[in-house]
């Protein structure tokens, strides 16, 4: 089997990772004083037990490079390299051994695996993206907008193909799922209205049909990670964004989205789900596509490239408050009108009943009281007659005789109207007497 450094490095797709491995292997080779081929053959020989060799001698040879890597790590520290740099230099040679199925086991507690948290990455904020966006062309704007929306790793981002872009004539935000290469986790992302608008302009400019990628290179592949990294640095410089010794990389967009997930209130778990970062299964059950869409909208309200002018935002807020107040007032007025309407119905009903009573009273006065008054000559005469009628000593017969008397006098005087009324009342008495007799017979 041919043992080769280049064969191993050709399998590393990430240019920056490949560059780091190459540098680490070079430094180890210089430290150890042998070529890569000699180092690999020696490692192979160490893992093969020789005839007559006891087990202890064999195992000591097998751990040779574990000890040598620790010494190499110490040498890097002694030469002024940082803890993280010294560790990174050891990764190349360790991965080389692993590639050829001869892994080196680093003992527990070794300083080789120790790292120190640093803050070399530029703390990218949406304000910086806006400044770069203002001086960017259409392709660069699409990159900035999609990077802000999706927060994907650079390898997954540059590999997006044109036919993976969903139908753009639908309601935004549009779901955009991506299977991530590193963790093999689906990123449940969305394309914002900003990004969709840019894509509608950008995609028709892609005239090379033989290249399937959304961000094609001059050949048949996509843009490289190195090209994209240089683009971001160039845009930041052109936008006059002070780096202060920090490094602006594409990964900064991912960190910005996760940080904004916390600041906007949607939560880090939802942010991880959007960018395709592994989360516990217990946290994954409630984050449906519908819930994620609501959270993405909430995130974009907090972090959008095309910032609304402050005066416009304030005006909208005032209008929203005014509309809310108007809605409350209308609701109150409707309640009052409903109550008034109900009361009006009651009043109308009462008025109708009163009107009936009034009509009855009027009819009674006109048809009954006034004629009787006329018979007795005056109201006082009627009142005196009624008193006698109500008296216990007054008999029905006496009342009838009095009426006959009044009738005769009226007839003598030729008072036809009173005569007619008296006749009607006498007729009433006649019927009343007949009714009384019938009741006496039954009773």
Image: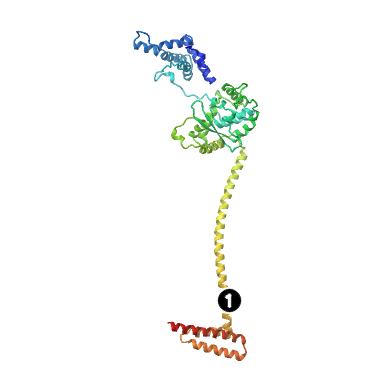
The answer to which quarter of the image holds residue 350 is bottom right
Residue bearing the label numbered 1: 363
The residue shown at (45%, 82%) is 439
Q: Residue 242, image x and y in percent? A: 58, 26
Q: Residue 197, image x and y in percent? A: 62, 34
Position of residue 431 relative to residue 230, above or below, is below
4 to the left or right of 48: right
Q: Judge whether residue 122 can be spotted in this image.
A: no
The answer to which quarter of the image holds residue 339 is bottom right
Colour pattern? rainbow
Nearest to the observer: residue 209 or residue 315 = 209
99 to the left or right of 322: left
66 to the left or right of 200: left
Q: Judge whether residue 419 can be spotted in this image.
A: yes
The residue shown at (56%, 80%) is 369
Instruction: Please identify the quadrant where the C terminus is shown.
Output: bottom left
């Amino acid at each position: 089997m041919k043992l080769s450094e280049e064969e191993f490095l050709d399998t590393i797709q990430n240019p920056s990772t490949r560059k780091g491995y190459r540098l680490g292997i070079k430094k180890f080779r210089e430290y150890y004083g042998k070529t890569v081929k000699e180092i690999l053959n020696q490692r192979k020989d160490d893992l093969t037990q020789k005839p007559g060799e006891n087990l202890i001698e064999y195992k000591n040879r097998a751990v040779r490079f574990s000890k040598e890597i620790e010494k190499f790590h110490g040498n890097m520290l002694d030469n002024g390299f940082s803890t993280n740099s010294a560790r990174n230099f050891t990764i190349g040679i360790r991965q080389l051994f692993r590639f050829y199925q001869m892994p080196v086991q680093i003992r527990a507690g070794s300083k080789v695996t120790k790292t120190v948290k640093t803050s070399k990455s530029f703390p990218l904020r949406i304000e910086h993206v806006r400044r770069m966006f203002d001086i960017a062309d259409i392709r660069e704007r699409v990159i900035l907008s999609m990077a802000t929306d999706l927060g994907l790793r650079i390898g997954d981002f540059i590999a997006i193909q044109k036919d993976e872009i969903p139908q753009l004539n639908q309601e935004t935000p549009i779901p955009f799922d991506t299977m991530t290469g590193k963790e093999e986790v689906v990123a449940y992302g969305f394309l914002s209205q900003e990004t969709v608008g840019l894509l509608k302009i950008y995609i028709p400019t892609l005239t090379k049909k033989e290249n399937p990628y959304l961000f094609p290179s001059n050949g048949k592949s996509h843009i490289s990670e190195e090209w994209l990294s240089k683009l971001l640095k160039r845009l930041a410089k052109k936008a006059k964004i002070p780096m202060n010794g920090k490094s602006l990389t594409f990964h900064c967009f991912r960190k910005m989205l996760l940080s904004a997930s916390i600041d906007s209130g949607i939560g880090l778990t939802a942010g991880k789900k959007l960018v395709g970062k592994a989360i516990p299964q217990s946290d994954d059950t409630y984050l449906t596509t519908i819930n994620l869409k609501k959270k993405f909208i909430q995130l974009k309200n907090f972090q959008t490239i095309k910032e609304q002018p402050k005066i416009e935002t304030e005006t909208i807020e005032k209008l929203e408050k005014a509309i809310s107040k108007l809605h409350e007032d209308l609701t109150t007025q409707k309640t009052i009108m409903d109550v008034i309407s109900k009361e009006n119905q009651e009043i109308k009903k009462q008025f109708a009943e009163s009107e009936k009573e009034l009509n009855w009273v009027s009819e009674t006065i006109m048809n009954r009281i006034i004629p009787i008054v006329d018979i007795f000559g005056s109201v006082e005469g009627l009142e005196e007659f009624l008193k006698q009628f109500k008296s216990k000593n007054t008999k029905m017969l006496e009342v009838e005789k009095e009426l006959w008397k009044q009738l005769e006098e009226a007839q003598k005087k030729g008072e036809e109207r009173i005569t007619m009324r008296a006749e009607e009342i006498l007729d009433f008495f006649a019927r009343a007497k007949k009714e009384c007799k019938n009741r006496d017979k039954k009773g």
